[in-house]
């Protein structure tokens, strides 16, 4: 309130304890505070208490709060700069505990959303919405689906909450939407996307892939993600089955 812009850094799972402060001390007053959440999603060997899988559902109910999920180190720097530049309310930047991979460049940026893949010469079958580091598996799944003759658009919203209106517009143009996130699928970014589509009378089916509403034990991060349908192979299989079942 005195003119500073605090940047608060903590594990994503520990933000659960500060919900009332986020809601009543920060968001209610539309204060410019940036929360940087490390260890978002599956942490691997740290176990059930440290998986950062509840922050997105919890934060989705906070009015005026914006959540960014960078897909690679370059986008982490970019989105942190954008978050600190916001002066009319709180922002969140969330990223996982894992080795930083190579940068995933966008084919185009439209209305602030990064288009990572578009199947050439194929119809608009599947819109894959990749939250943060799920961009890599989604891009790999898109290449596999294209080999099956399925047209895929992969988009990284960059800011996953609130849902960007352009995402809803793109959803209406595809046969199927699959939202993929490394957080709880209950009340997360995918659920918010499905609600936004329903509110706009968009009838395209929305499948939400994410972590289940249960405690997940320790283990290898990639293996745990794959066990819960968040690998490229699992995303590909989900898309093919959903298209087969679609009317």
Image (tube, rainbow, N blue to C red):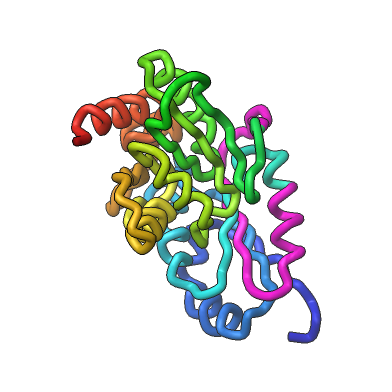
Residue in the foreground of this view, choosing between 28 and 197: 197
Image coordinates for residue 65, horizontal then vertical, percent? 56, 69
Q: Is residue 103 magenta?
A: yes
Quarter of the view holding residue 114: top right
Q: Is residue 93 left or right of residue 221?
A: right
Q: Tell me if residue 46 can be seen.
A: no
Where 102 sits versus 134, above or below? above
> Tag count in the figure?
0
Where 64 sits versus 97, above or below? below
Q: Is residue 37 magenta?
A: no
Q: Residue at x 39, y 38 (%)?
A: 174
Quadrant holding the N terminus: bottom right
Q: Is residue 145 left or right of residue 167?
A: left
Where 144 sits versus 243, above or below? above
Quadrant holding the C terminus: top left
Image coordinates for residue 88, horizontal then vertical, percent? 68, 75
Q: Is residue 32 left or right of residue 22?
A: right
Image coordinates for residue 143, horizontal then vertical, percent? 47, 20
Q: Residue at x 39, y 29 (%)?
A: 223
Q: Which residues are magenta?
A: 78-105
Q: Residue at x 73, y 72 (%)?
A: 87
């Amino acid at each position: 309130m005195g003119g500073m812009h605090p940047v608060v850094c903590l594990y994503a799972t520990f933000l659960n304890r500060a919900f009332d402060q986020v809601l009543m001390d920060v968001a209610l007053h539309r204060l410019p505070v940036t929360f940087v959440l490390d260890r978002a999603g599956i942490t691997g060997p740290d176990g059930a208490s440290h998986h950062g899988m509840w922050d997105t559902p919890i934060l989705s109910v906070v009015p005026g709060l914006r959540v960014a999920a960078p897909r690679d180190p370059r986008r982490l720097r970019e989105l942190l700069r954008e978050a600190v530049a916001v002066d009319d309310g709180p922002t969140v930047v969330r990223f996982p505990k894992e080795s930083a991979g190579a940068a995933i460049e966008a084919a185009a940026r439209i209305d602030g959303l990064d288009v990572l893949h578009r199947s050439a010469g194929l119809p608009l079958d599947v819109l894959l919405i990749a939250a943060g580091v799920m961009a890599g598996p989604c891009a790999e799944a898109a290449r596999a689906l294209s080999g099956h003759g399925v047209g895929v658009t992969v988009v990284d919203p960059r800011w996953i909450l609130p849902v960007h209106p352009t995402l809803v517009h793109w959803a209406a143009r595809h046969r199927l939407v699959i939202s993929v996130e490394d957080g709880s699928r209950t009340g997360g970014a995918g659920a918010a996307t499905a609600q936004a589509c329903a509110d706009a009378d968009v009838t395209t089916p929305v499948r939400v892939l994410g972590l289940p509403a249960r405690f997940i034990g320790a283990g290898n991060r990639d293996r745990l993600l794959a066990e819960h349908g968040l690998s490229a192979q699992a995303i590909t299989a989900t898309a093919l089955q959903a298209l087969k079942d679609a009317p």
